[in-house]
Image (cartoon, rainbow, N blue to C red):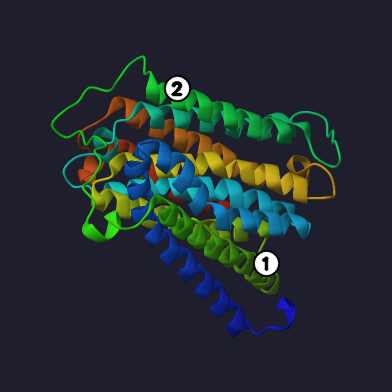
Amino acid sequence: MWQDLSLTVLIGAFLAAGAVIFLAGLRMTGLADKLADRTGLGEALIGGVLLGAATSLSGIVVSVTAALDGRSSLAFSNSVGGIAAQTVFLALADMFHRRSNLEHAAADLGNVFQGITLMVLLTLPFLAMTTPEVAIWAVHPVTFVIPLAYALGLVAGRQVQQSPMWTPVDTCDTKTDQPEEEDEETRKTSTTRLFLTFALLMSLMGGAGYVIARTASELGDRAQVSDTLVGVLATAVVTSLPELVTTVAAVRRGALQLAVGGIIGGNTFDTLFLVASDVAYREGSLYHAVLPQDYFWIVSALLMTGILIGGLILRQRRGPGRIGGESMLLLLIYAGSVAVQVLVAG
């Protein structure tokens, strides 16, 4: 079917699916903020779990679809490339918070702990790569460890939120998570309806992710571009648009913990793409089927996450260009990684 479509139709479908992801992500931010207040779970947790998982749905559809087609590099690079892209989105969002550095104002222990969990999860694929190619039902044992580590991280993160052993120092620039007063229309909307609307938007994003996977694969084949490059610079960026939209929108709404938590939580959830992809990839271990340049993006993501955590702990008030020093580093590292990837692919 997709092979029979013209180049114009393929590009149009790709852009239309990207627009659906963009608009659905924009609507999700407001809903997530309201649900954080309604449920009392807080912006950091809702951003890290509910919003992070929801905005990642289109990406996981892309990775699973690619894995089912036997395109291991596209499935893998879409996941880890999305983590790097979404991390750099925080640097872009920092530009919209003019009062101070975003990482300073959004101080939250839960986000720091989530970032550490993400770094642990990102090391597990390396563990798989450096061990013999063992598979159980064509699935590598590390694939069973990743969701367990993810779940334990969520449980421990909740404990950190409820009974913190230390708290960040409040300054005049710190923006704490305070429930907002709901308008008349929102008060009339039940929590159940808010969740149902959220679920509907997730479904739209999942369908759009399928279209992105099919059209991007076909466009890459026609242009004779490697799956790694397609995954990192096309599908990963487009399916990550909700994170950019929700992060900037959350910053402009003053929901700073939601903005940072949504990115870190979304990145943590994105490691589960590898679990789903390894299960869907029926030719053996996904971790041994991919190319070295695919693992290059895990290194980039680890480096960027470490710098982000350092920024959350250091809490620089202002940096160069009125953004944090860590934001500047994130932009430079991502740009450098893209340049290296293009040179390798060329």
Q: Nearer the viewer, residue 140 or 310?
A: 140
Q: Position of residue 50 (x, y in %)?
A: 47, 45
How far apart are the alpha carbons under marks 2 and 1? 42 Å
Residue 313: x %, y % from top left: 33, 25
- Residue 161, image x, y percentages: 39, 25
Disc 1 residue type?
A: Ser
Q: Nearer the viewer, residue 208 or 43?
A: 43
Mark before the other along the chain sequence, 2 or 1: 2
Please name the residue shown 45% across and 60% down the image.
197
State whether residue 199 is above or below residue 7: above
152 vs 307, left or right, is: right
Asked if residue 290 shows in the view, the reply is: no
Residue at 58% across, 61% down:
206
Residue 217 image-quadrant placement: bottom right
The residue sitting at the left extreme is 172
Residue labelled with disc 2: 159
Q: Nearer the viewer, mark 2 or mark 1?
A: 2
Question: Amino acid under label 2?
Answer: Gln
| Relative horizontal placement of residue 276, taking residue 112 as reference (left or right) | right
